[in-house]
Structure formats: structure tokens, C-alpha cells
Image (cartoon, helix red, strand yellow):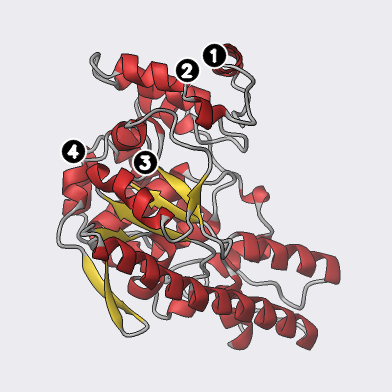
Amino acid sequence: MGHRLCAESEYPAALLAVAAYRLPGSDRAFPAGPLPSEEWAALLEAAREHRMTGLLTAAIGAGAFPATCGQAREVTSAHAKNQMRVLALEGELLRILGLLEGAGIESRVLKGTAAAHLDYPDPALRSVNGLDVLVRADDIARSVAVLGTAGFERTPAEPRPGFDRRFDKGMTLRPPAGYELDLHRTFVPGPWGRMVDLDAVWDAGEEFTVAGRAVRALSRPNRFLHACYHAALGNWPLRLGSLRDVAEMLRVLDHAPAEVLRTAAAWGAEAVVAAAVADAVRLLGIKVPGELARWAVAYVPSAREESWLGLHAQPDKTFAAQALATLRMLPWRDKPAYLRALAFPDAHHTEARHHSPLSRFTYALREARGGAPVK
């Protein structure tokens, strides 16, 4: 069974053209005239969901996407609201980085904020709805404690002490302001995340400026790899904004892919990179790919890689299935602690979710066997 592809029919046709706007070599065409009201409403909602309001606003403003005056006002308003949120989030980002720096904790800005400033010709083209920050595995518990003093709360609690540092991708924290901060120690959960070389991620990185203050993201090759993980293994159907991130960096890396391919091979992530790049080329209609894109389109994943990719190619992803795949690749010395944390977590982790450790264990077995989404 081959890798499951995300069908073009998952998206409004006009949204694919928006996602490809200004990409060299794309053959995605905008509609000939303004969309009917129902189609427009569906497109605008999808543009919000896929982080596309900036590109849609730019395409309409340039006259590339035909729209009525009312439609143009709607998307301009939607994007203005997002940009106001971005400004607020960037202020929060500086506060978060300041708290971590004050505690002697090194960090890197990830995903949307970094991509917008470093990889797009105009940061306003990339909508952002939350914040993502990377810290070292050994700093994860201290980071949570430091942010906790500023009102950040995590839900659920850590299954058992040390689980975050040893096994998890990270966690989501929510401050009183109500947005989500994803605090990472690696790129993704499950077996793919286990294979990331966490030492190699912490190279010199790349600097950019937020509100006059210098902050640091991953280096471009590592940023591109993270974008591939997020695009291929994040949302299903695939989020077009994440594929656009891949496509933006592909402009630079497509003709000099040696470092990316070396790192992907070292991390066992070639199938992830190939899937993300091939999907970006296919769904965004890029017809003039370079060396990296040609490699990606021709890549044939192994049976194990297909199985691991398949864990993410469904709308209701199953944590239990990812946990089983992770368990199989853990060193024997780590398996007991991993199993114990998941099957018999501390009471504060299961509070309001399971009535007893036995009910949690029974639930975990049922989910692992049946593949139903873990809640």
C-alpha cells in the first residue's frame, strides 16, 4: 500500500490558486470572475483555516483574483484582524523569550512567526494564530516552571515526571490571554520525532527582528526540515499554509539541496521531506522544480516509512497508534518507563478524564487495538 495522497478535492479550487500565488512556475489559475456568494463564503473560511488571508488579500489587491467590492472588504477585514492578532502575539513572544532568557534558558522561535519574517517577501503574507518556541530537552521542565510564574498553564499535566524531557514532543501552554504556546523539545510526536538529532538542531540559527528586538530562529536548512515535518505530519487534510512554507524555502534550497538531504538521511527523515516537497509541488501546481523537488517526486518510501506516514494521513489521528510505533523503536532500557507513564499515569494527568488507573489502562488498550482517536 502506497503513501496516501491528500486529494485536490479537499480544497476549494480557488484556494489552491491562492496558496500558489506568486510562486514561479505554478499553473494554478484564479477564477475568471467573482465567485458566487456561497462559494466565496466557503473560500474565505478555508483561507482563514489554512493561514491564507494574507495571500488572498494580496491577490485581490493586485487584481489577480477577481472579487466584488464587498468580497474585497471582507477579506481585507479578516486579514486586518489576523494582523492585529499577530502584533499582539509578537509582543507576547518577546515576553516569553525574555522570561526564558532571564532564567538562562536558550530558545529558538519556530514555525509561523519565523517563516513569516525570514522566508516570505512580506511577513504579512503569512498568517499566524499561535506561537511555537523550541527549548532544549533538559530545559523543558524548568521552562514550564518559569512560564508558570507568568500564568501559563498546561493541559493535561505530564503523565509522569521526566516524560516530557525523555519522550514527548513538548506541550501546549495557555496564558490568561487565551492563545496557545507550543513549547517544543523536538519537531513532532511519535517515531519521527524520536529520530530528530536534537543536538544538530541547535546550531547557530538565524536572527530576525521583532519590534526592534533581535530573536533567533533555526538555520534555514533546519527550518526547512521542520517545515517539512509540520506540512507532512501536521494537519489532515494538509494545511496549505504549511505547504506554502515549504515552497517558499524551496525557492532557495531546491538548486543546492546537499545539506538538507544529508541531514534528512542522518535523521531518517527522507520520507518526510519527500512527502512534504512532493505534496507542495503537486498541490501548488509547481511545474519547474529543481533538484530537490525532482528527488522528492521520485522517492519511494519503505514499508516502515509508509506505515509511519500513514499514522498522520487521517483526520482523526490516533495517539495510541503513534505510541505503539514509538515504543517499538525505543531502546529496551526506556520501554518500561514509557509504558508505565502511558498506561498508569499520575492522577493529576488523568483528572476529569479517567476514573482510575485501571480505567486508563483499559482505555489505552482499546484505543491501541481499535485505532479510535485518543481524547
Residue 266 got which mark? 4
How much space separates mark 3 and mark 4, taking CA atoms? Answer: 13 Å
Residue mark closest to the camera, 4 vs 1: 1
How much space separates mark 3 and mark 2, taking CA atoms? Answer: 32 Å
Label 1: which residue? 361
Residue 119 visible in the current orientation: yes
Three-letter residue code for mark 2: Phe
Query: Of label 4 and label 1, which has the lower sequence position?
Result: 4
Q: In terms of secondary structure, where does tag 3 sit?
A: helix
> Quick one: 326 or 264, which is closer to the camera?
326
Q: Residues within 10 Å of mark 4 (few under 14, many from 20)?
A: few
Q: In terms of secondary structure, where does tag 1 sit?
A: helix
On the image, the x and y values in percent for residue 60 come to 64, 82
> Quick one: 187 or 353, which is closer to the camera?
353
> Quick one: 75 or 69, which is closer to the camera?
75
Query: Of label 3 and label 4, which has the lower sequence position?
Result: 4
Three-letter residue code for mark 4: Ala
Query: Of label 2 and label 1, which has the lower sequence position?
Result: 2
Residue 6 against residue 254 in the figure, above or below: above
Residue 75 against residue 154 in the figure, above or below: below
Q: Residues within 10 Å of mark 2 (few under 14, many from 20)?
A: many
Q: Residues within 10 Å of mark 3 (few under 14, many from 20)?
A: many
On the image, the x and y values in percent for residue 251 come to 33, 67
How much space separates mark 4 and mark 1, taking CA atoms? Answer: 36 Å
Label 3: which residue? 272
